[in-house]
């Protein structure tokens, strides 16, 4: 069964996994998403949900290794209709698979 993993983000840019009670990083958040879990990132100082900000940073980080996908995803985002969300997911999956094959 999939879980909701909650991470706390601190001013010093450290990320704390509330489930494991250990420091975490972007790779662990990404792995949690790949495992099908929901994630939430809370800014510890204010209690604000900054999940969207952190996920965007992870996406940008993944795209550094595959710049050709940046333009592709940006165009899909600009078109903005609902069927394009599947195209975005496919493009992101391609980026992740390509990056994983580069690290093997």
Image (cartoon, grey):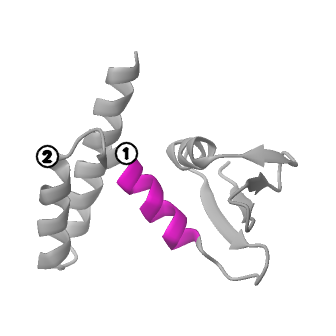
In which quadrant of the rendered view does residue 45 lie? bottom right
Which is nearer the eye, 85 or 41? 41
Q: Residue at x 76, y 84 (%)?
A: 46
Number of numbered discs overlaid on the protein picture: 2
Q: Residue at x 29, y 55 (%)?
A: 89
Q: Residue 20: x, y in percent?
A: 84, 45
State the residue lying farthest toward the top. Answer: 104
Say which mark, if any, is on residue 62: 1
Which is nearer the eye, 51 or 25? 25
How packed mark 1 is, by other alpha carbons closer than 10 Å (few <14, some 14-19, many 20 or more), is some
Location of mark 2 (residue): 68
Horizontal side of 75 relative to 38 (left or right) equals left
Question: Is residue 79 among the parts visible in the rendering?
Answer: yes
Secondary structure under badge 1? Answer: helix
State the residue lying farthest toward the front. Answer: 12
Which is nearer the eye, 91 or 83? 91
The part of the chain drawn in magenta is 51-61
Q: Which part of the image, by quadrant, shows the C terminus?
A: top left
Q: CA distance from mark 2 to mark 1?
A: 12 Å
In which quadrant of the rendered view does residue 5 lie? bottom right
The answer to whether the residue labelled 2 contacts the one labelled 1, judged by CB atoms less than 8 Å apart, is: no
State the residue lying farthest toward the right. Answer: 21
Secondary structure under badge 2? Answer: helix
Question: Is residue 83 among the parts visible in the rendering?
Answer: no
Horizontal side of 69 relative to 49 (left or right) equals left
């Amino acid at each position: 069964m999939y879980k909701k993993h909650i991470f706390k983000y601190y001013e010093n840019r450290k990320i704390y996994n509330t489930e494991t009670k250990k420091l975490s990083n972007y790779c662990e958040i990404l792995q949690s998403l790949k495992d099908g879990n929901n994630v939430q990132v809370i800014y510890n100082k204010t209690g604000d949900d900054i999940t969207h900000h952190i996920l965007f940073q992870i996406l940008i980080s993944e795209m550094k290794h595959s710049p050709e996908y940046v333009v592709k995803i940006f165009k899909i985002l600009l078109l903005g209709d609902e069927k394009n969300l599947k195209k975005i997911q496919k493009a992101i999956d391609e980026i992740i698979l390509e990056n994983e094959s580069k690290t093997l």
